Image (cartoon, rainbow, N blue to C red):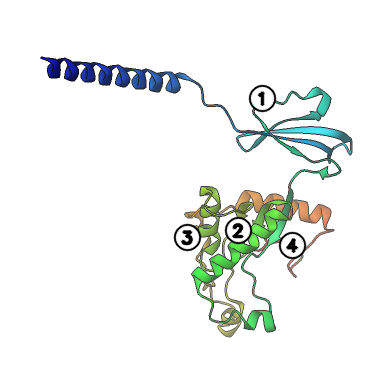
Amino acid sequence: MADQHRRGQRVGVGKWIAAVVLASSFAAAAQPVQPHVTALVGATVVDVDSGRETPDAAVLIEDGRIVRIGPRATVAVPPGARIRSMTGKWLIPGLMNMHVHLGLKLPGAAGAALVGETDPQEVLRMAGNARRSLLSGVTTVRLVGEDHGNDFALRAEIDRGEVIGPRIKTAGGDHRPDRRAWLARGGRSLRARPGGSRADQAGRGLDQDRDLRRHRRQSRRHLGGAHDGRGAVDADRGHPP
């Protein structure tokens, strides 16, 4: 009888513990998930649109997005936020580089060292260049000609958070007619260079027509009419100025 009583007590205690754990789980699930907040305090923030400067500012970043900027005295930093002192520093919006080749192979010794580079090796090298771009303050890049769809692969990894890098807008590979072949065949060849046709690349997420046409207009306005030798910037060739 004593053994049965002790077993009954253990069963009762076990049920009580299970009930407490279950109730705690329900209570935790009912609580809203608190956002991760970082506060950058003490820097001078530059508004590049107006040219105004805000000294001793506070910048609140919630789950990776800036939610408020203002003088530190007027910005309430929520309890539990991670605070980073930026005293003596200057903050500006992220830079945008609109003509980038992350996989560029230059003539000479630098290019010669990359002869025989495989696509996986090139993507890894591009990832390193992308990381350096982001750490230098460039948060958006426009790729204007990469090999074999490596730009699409890198962009996907950055978007998934597997690789650190800026946002990528890409014009894909160079899909102009091969000019040497075109000349050799009397100007009638339409064979595209490796990288695929525009239609092929569009299926992989090509950031092209509309963005490139806008960039062409901006280039003419800001660069004094940049052109490709024919008097106009070609928005369909995967390599804007």
Report x, y in % for residue 173.
57, 65
Work out how far the residue at label 3 is from the one at label 4, CA to CA, in angstroms: 25 Å
Mark 4 sits on what residue? 232
Relative depth, front residue between 6 and 214: 6
Work out how far the residue at label 3 is from the one at label 2, CA to CA, in angstroms: 12 Å
Q: Secondary structure at mark 4?
A: loop
The answer to which of marks 2 and 4 sits earlier in the sequence is 2
Give the foreground label among 3 and 2.
2
Left-right relation of 147 to 20:
right
| Total numbered circles | 4
The answer to which of marks 3 and 2 sits earlier in the sequence is 2
Q: Which picture quadrant has residue 64?
A: top right
Say few, some or many: other residues with alpha carbon within 10 Å of mark 4 (under 14 / 14 to 19 / 20 or more): few
Q: Secondary structure at mark 1?
A: loop
Disc number at residue 200?
A: 3
Mark 1 sits on what residue? 79
Please report the residue visible at 50 percent of the width from the left and 59 percent of the height from the top.
Answer: 153
Q: Name the residue type under label 1.
A: Pro
**Does the residue at mark 2 contact the one at mark 1 (Cβ under 8 Å)?**
no
Give the foreground label among 1 and 3.
1
Mark 2 sits on what residue? 171
